[in-house]
Image: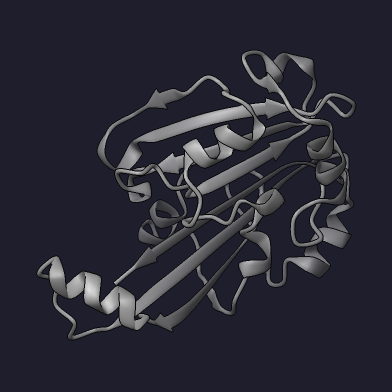
């Protein structure tokens, strides 16, 4: 997965101010507030895969919905920290070959995949996606994508922790960036990717 940050740095993507948070809570697992272990504790001990290093590092686990055969992949990248917090997720419906090695999911996840995340669901039309994911643009790899960013003040507890860790509090804010991308075949969404970063 070509990262959101890499696209921005390469000048291939422009973000728009806006929340986008509605896309960052897949099935009750909010990005950057849920770890890979949290997901495994609730959905089952899926096999952990690790690839790349430094900025390209990814730890992933995947599940397959029993009825739809949709594949749900949870990702922790470099910014997931020592606890391997989720930094991204993907939902795909590309056929049985792409679910090899994924753990069968609980029945409730099958239903949740059908509902989607933030209103976006596999199988929806490109037009419906564009209405929900405002200002989506076409990437060079064929996906439709949109970026959102916003700034939040650090909580008193976060400021205390940063101070104890010897970090500067000159800029007591978090800059949040959210990347939402959809891949389409015959005008239908076959894969959704959402990535979230928080930096100071």
Task: From this view, report whether residue 84 is shown above or below residue 199.
Answer: above
Estimate the x, y position of residue 37 in percent, counting from the top left.
Answer: 48, 36
Q: Is residue 170 among what the camera can see?
A: yes
Please tell me how many numbered marks the rendered image carries. 0
Q: Is residue 12 left or right of residue 107?
A: left
Of residues 11 and 120, the one drawn nearer to the viewer in this rendering: 120
The image quarter containing residue 93 is top right
Task: From this view, report whether residue 155 is shown above or below residue 91.
Answer: below
Task: From this view, report whether residue 61 is shown above or below residue 22.
Answer: above
What residue do we see at 47% from left, 67% from top? 177
Image quadrant containing the C terminus: bottom left
The image quarter containing residue 138 is bottom right
Of all residues, the one furthest to the left in this rendering is 166
Q: Is residue 145 left or right of residue 31?
A: right
Estimate the x, y position of residue 159 in percent, counting from the top left.
Answer: 26, 78
Task: From this view, report whether residue 59 is shown above or below residue 124.
Answer: above
What residue do we see at 17% from left, 86% from top? 170
What residue do we see at 56% from left, 59% from top? 179
Of residues 112 and 179, the one drawn nearer to the viewer in this rendering: 112
Colour scheme employed for the rendering of this structure:
one colour
Estimate the x, y position of residue 193 in percent, counting from the top left.
Answer: 63, 47
What residue do we see at 66% from left, 13% from top? 100
Estimate the x, y position of residue 3 in percent, counting from the top left.
Answer: 45, 48
Q: Is residue 144 among what the camera can see?
A: no
């Amino acid at each position: 997965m070509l990262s959101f940050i890499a696209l921005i740095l390469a000048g291939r993507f422009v973000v728009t101010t806006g929340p986008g948070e509605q896309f960052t809570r897949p099935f009750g697992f909010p990005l950057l507030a849920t770890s890979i272990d949290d997901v495994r504790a609730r959905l089952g001990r899926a096999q952990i895969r690790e690839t790349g290093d430094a900025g390209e590092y990814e730890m992933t686990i995947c599940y397959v919905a029993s009825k739809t055969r949709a594949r749900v992949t949870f990702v922790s990248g470099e910014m997931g920290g020592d606890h391997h917090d989720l930094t991204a997720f993907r939902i795909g419906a590309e056929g049985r070959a792409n679910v090899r090695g994924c753990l069968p999911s609980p029945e409730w996840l099958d239903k949740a995949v059908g509902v989607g995340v933030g209103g976006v669901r596999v199988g929806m039309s490109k037009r419906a996606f564009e209405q929900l994911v405002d200002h989506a643009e076409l990437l060079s790899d064929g996906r439709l994508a949109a970026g959102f960013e916003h700034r939040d003040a650090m909580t008193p507890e976060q400021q205390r922790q940063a101070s104890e860790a010897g970090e500067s509090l000159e800029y007591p804010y978090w800059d949040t960036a959210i990347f939402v991308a959809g891949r389409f075949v015959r005008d239908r969404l076959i894969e959704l990717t959402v990535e979230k970063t928080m930096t100071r």
